[in-house]
Image (cartoon, rainbow, N blue to C red):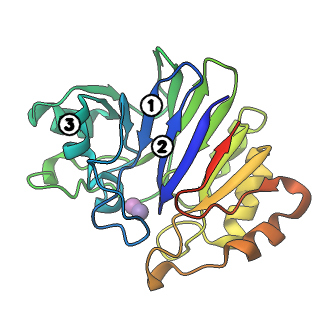
Amino acid sequence: MAKLTFIGHATFALETDDGARLVIDPFLADNPTTELTADDLEADFILLTHGHYDHVADAIPLARRTGATIIASFEIASYMEEQGLQASPQHIGGGVHYPFGYVKMTPALHGGQLALPGGEKYTTAPAGFLIDLEGGKRFYHAGDTALLTDMQLLRGRVDVAALPIGDRFTMGLADAVRAVEFVEPELVIPCHYNTWPLIEQDGDAFKEAVGARAETRVMAPGDVIEF
Ligand code: NI
Ligand code: MN
């Protein structure tokens, strides 16, 4: 069983059944929904969907302390290598086999700025991740994105999906329900909402709107599921 912890906002920790520790989009110290900092998490791999501050804020301190490899788009990986960190560059549509499974970057429609000091020239396309674990389960983290017809290509290929529902910067509730129709995951987890008033949404209303299309788990920060 893989163990998935919702840290808050779009930050997740995923521990695979063979013990690999993944952290996706570490946003900790300035994240109003968690007390955790980069000192509290362990990581072998850090996955970054895109360069916005609320996705990369704590990647560098976490990678420095743990020695984790950063998995990100070529441009963001290059930036991280320039900081002296270990990185594995990928890009949209491409996958890489890691000891814990196969990670493919998926399209996301969103902004591309790398919001870290000196990051301007590393501006790039944002992405999501499809993580195909050795154990056979598949986790899709959509990243920050609009609803994309391309999501239909994931149908039948996802067991657990984390989808943004915050509206304003990403899909809102109604489009996230359409994303569930496109992807048909067994389990869907709403994220990227209620972090600030600007992206206030009702997670339970999302669950109700998804209805029988999938099981919906409205996770509070710190909640853990196994799959
Ligand atoms: Ni963003
Ligand atoms: Mn964001």
Q: Left or right of 170: which side holds 60?
A: left
Q: Crowding near pointer 3: few (<14 within 10 Å), some, many (20+)?
A: few
Q: Amino acid at mark 2?
A: Ala
Q: Residue at x 22, y 58 (%)?
A: 115
- The reply to whether the C-beta atoms of the residues labelled 3 and 2 are less than 8 Å apart is no
Q: Left or right of 18: which side holds 79?
A: left
The residue indicated by pointer 1 is 21
| Cα distance in 3D space between marks 3 and 1 | 14 Å
Residue 127 got which mark?
Answer: none
| 54 is higher (above) or lower (below) than 168 | above
Residue 13 got which mark?
Answer: 2
- The reply to whether the C-beta atoms of the residues labelled 2 and 1 are less than 8 Å apart is yes
Does the Cβ of the disc 1 residue fall within 8 Å of ligand 2?
no
| Cα distance in 3D space between marks 2 and 1 | 7 Å
Q: Residue at x 37, y 43 (%)?
A: 48
x, y percent for residue 14: 52, 38
The residue indicated by pointer 3 is 65
Q: Secondary structure at mark 3?
A: helix
Nearer to me, 78 or 148: 78
Quarter of the image where ligand 2 sits: bottom left
Q: Residue at x 36, y 47 (%)?
A: 125
* Rendered image quadrant of residue 178: bottom right
x, y percent for residue 172: 62, 72
The quadrant of the picture occupied by the C terminus is: top right
